[in-house]
Image (cartoon, rainbow, N blue to C red):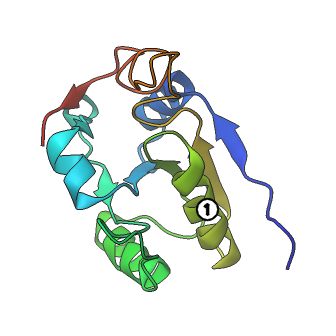
Amino acid sequence: MGEVHIESVSVEEAWTRLKGDAGSVLIDVRTIAEWAYVGLPDLSAIGKRPVLVEWQGFPDDRLNAAFVERLTEALTPIGADRNSELLFICRSGQRSLKAAQAMTAAGYACCRNVADGFEGPLDPNRHRGQLGGWKAKGLPWAQG
């Protein structure tokens, strides 16, 4: 099977879509450690919460073999279906792209990757959170 093309959206566009479409969902696929120590997107101002399902574990980086099943279970009670817009976010956009591809392959029609993720790319000092991403763009977030 070839790579599935996934549309990438900026963090600002993701926020606009989350605000404008009551059925859209932000899915954070980082690790429990990242959620706790780096922070989470705060969607409370628009009456939403991010769905949290790890793409891979910490510290072993093993892929979550039950990812599609766990995410499907998490989407059902919030009324999301295979046609809901699902916006995937991770630290910098790599894991979220893979997660979006997996959910597209599972039959979800509107999976998007949030480019630059929560913390964005590395700067010249090898630090994240300055050049791009959810936090650097001033979007609402909270410490876990």
Amino acid, disc 1? Lys
Q: Is residue 83 above or below residue 8?
A: below
Examine the image and state in which quarter residue 142 appears. top left
Q: Position of residue 60 (x, y in %)?
A: 35, 72
Residue at x 50% of width, y 69% of height: 81
Height in image: 87 above or below 106?
Answer: above
Q: Is residue 41 above or below residue 36?
A: above
Q: Quadrant of residue 56?
A: bottom left
- Mark yes or no: residue 85 visible: no
Relative to 11, 129 lies left or right: left
Task: Name the residue at 27% across, 36% down.
Answer: 43
| Quadrant (top left, top right, bottom left, bottom right) of the C terminus | top left
Q: Position of residue 105 (x, y in %)?
A: 69, 75
Residue 126: give x, y in percent of width and height.
45, 25
- Report the residue marked by disc 1: 98
SS assignment at label 1: helix
